[in-house]
Structures are given as structure tokens and as C-alpha cells.
Image: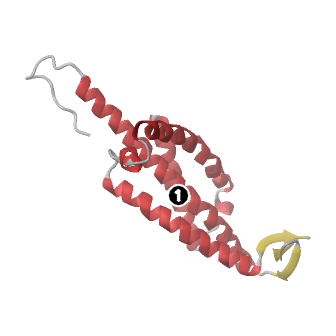
């Protein structure tokens, strides 16, 4: 679980950095083409997180499920989960609206164009092409951030729960030498 937590944390940091870079006029895809591996990384951390959530759900049922899943994560991480869930909805809606209003950027016959349903709408300047590509990238990177932060929060909470359980069941050999581990 520690490895998954590290991957989730790294995935969140990289996806947030790439997302913000796209607002600053930097094309993360051009600077670091393997950035799309973050798409695959979601599955690496999310599948085990879903299995963990199923286990929690079986124990708790629907009532209080989320509270149990994140109870040992810091409050700021829980707040970030909510923030990024809301942000992802607005980000995706905004980018989808921007792209659907006009079309999708692509290269046809070596020319940068805006295309909709296979029909070339217009030729694009480099600046326009980048702007439309940024919309597409932001839609994906917004989702990456939410999947990674939620996974990171749940995995950290689970790890802390296990640590607390170990402290509680460890034998108290000598009251003077036993120190309580604080999470």
C-alpha cells in the first residue's frame, strides 16, 4: 500500500503541475510527451483503491461510508478531495463547452485545423491550435487530479488506520518503556 500511496501522490503532483502549466502557455505534451502515462497511472492506484472501498462498504454499508474511508486522513486532504471533485465538474463542463461550440484541433494534410465530425471548419494559427489543444488537455488532467487526490486520501487513511490498530493491539510490556505512537 505504501507504493500505491507514493504513486498516487506523485500522480497528483504531476497532474496538478501539468494542468497549471497549460494555463501558463506551456504545452505539457510537447515538453514531456510521456505525460499521458498519468492516464494509465490512474488505473494503477484506482483499482486497488476501489477494492479497498468495497471492503469498507461491506463493513459499514451506505451510512457513513465516506467518513470511514477518509477518517484518518488529514482534514486538508479531505477538503482537497471535495474541491477537486467540484473543480473537475466545472473544468470538464467548461472545456467540453468550448470544444463543442466549435470543434476539435487536429492536423490534416500537415495543416493545423479545427474539425467537427470529420469536417474541417477552419485552418488555425499556432496560437489558436495550442489554445484548443489546451482545452482538451485540461479536460483530461482535471480528471487525473481528482482520481489521484481521492486515491491518495483513501490510501493514507487506510494506512493510518492500520497503524492505529497495531498500536492498540501491541502488548504493553512495561508501562515505563511503552510509548504511544501518534498518527
Q: Residue at x 67, y 78 (%)?
A: 98
Residue 109 visible here:
yes
Residue 113 visible here:
no
Secondary structure at badge 1 equals helix
Q: Residue at x 63, y 73 (%)?
A: 95
Counting from the top left corner in percent of width and height, residue 125 is at 77, 81
138 lies above or below 62: below
Quadrant in which the C terminus is drawn: top left
Question: From the viewer's perspective, is 51 left or right of 164?
Answer: right
Mark 1 Cα shell of 10 Å, populated few (<14), some (14-19), many (≥20): many
Mark count: 1
Q: Nearer the viewer, residue 111 or 155?
A: 155
Q: Residue at x 48, y 41 (%)?
A: 53
Counting from the top left corner in percent of width and height, residue 84 is at 47, 62
Counting from the top left corner in percent of width and height, residue 42 is at 59, 48
Question: From the viewer's perspective, is 164 left or right of 140?
Answer: left
57 lies above or below 136: above
Seen as rendered, the residue at the extreme right is: 109
Describe the colour scheme in one phrase: secondary structure
Question: From the viewer's perspective, is 164 left or right of 136?
Answer: left
Residue 154 position by quadrant:
top left
The residue where tag 1 is placed is 145
Q: Nearer the viewer, residue 101 or 130?
A: 101
153 lies above or below 136: above
Q: Residue at x 82, y 75 (%)?
A: 116
Q: Nearer the viewer, residue 1 or 13?
A: 1
Counting from the top left corner in percent of width and height, residue 106 is at 80, 70
41 lies above or below 112: above
Seen as rendered, the residue at the extreme left is: 176
Amino acid at each position: 500500500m505504501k507504493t500505491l500511496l507514493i504513486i498516487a501522490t506523485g500522480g497528483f503532483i504531476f497532474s496538478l503541475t501539468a494542468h497549471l502549466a497549460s494555463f501558463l502557455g506551456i504545452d505539457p505534451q510537447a515538453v514531456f510527451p510521456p505525460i499521458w502515462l498519468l492516464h494509465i497511472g490512474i488505473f494503477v492506484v484506482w483499482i486497488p483503491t476501489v477494492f479497498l472501498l468495497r471492503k469498507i462498504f461491506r463493513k459499514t454499508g451506505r451510512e457513513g461510508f465516506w467518513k470511514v474511508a477518509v477518517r484518518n486522513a488529514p482534514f486538508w486532504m479531505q477538503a482537497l478531495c471535495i474541491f477537486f471533485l467540484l473543480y473537475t465538474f466545472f473544468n470538464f463542463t467548461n472545456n467540453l463547452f468550448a470544444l463543442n461550440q466549435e470543434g476539435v484541433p487536429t492536423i490534416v494534410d500537415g495543416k493545423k485545423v479545427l474539425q467537427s465530425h470529420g469536417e474541417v471548419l477552419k485552418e488555425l494559427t499556432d496560437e489558436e491550435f495550442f489554445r484548443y489543444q489546451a482545452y482538451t488537455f485540461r479536460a483530461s488532467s482535471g480528471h487525473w487530479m481528482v482520481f489521484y487526490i481521492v486515491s491518495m486520501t483513501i490510501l493514507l487513511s487506510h494506512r493510518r488506520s492500520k497503524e492505529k490498530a497495531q498500536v492498540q493491539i501491541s502488548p504493553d510490556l512495561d508501562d515505563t518503556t511503552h510509548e504511544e505512537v501518534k498518527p
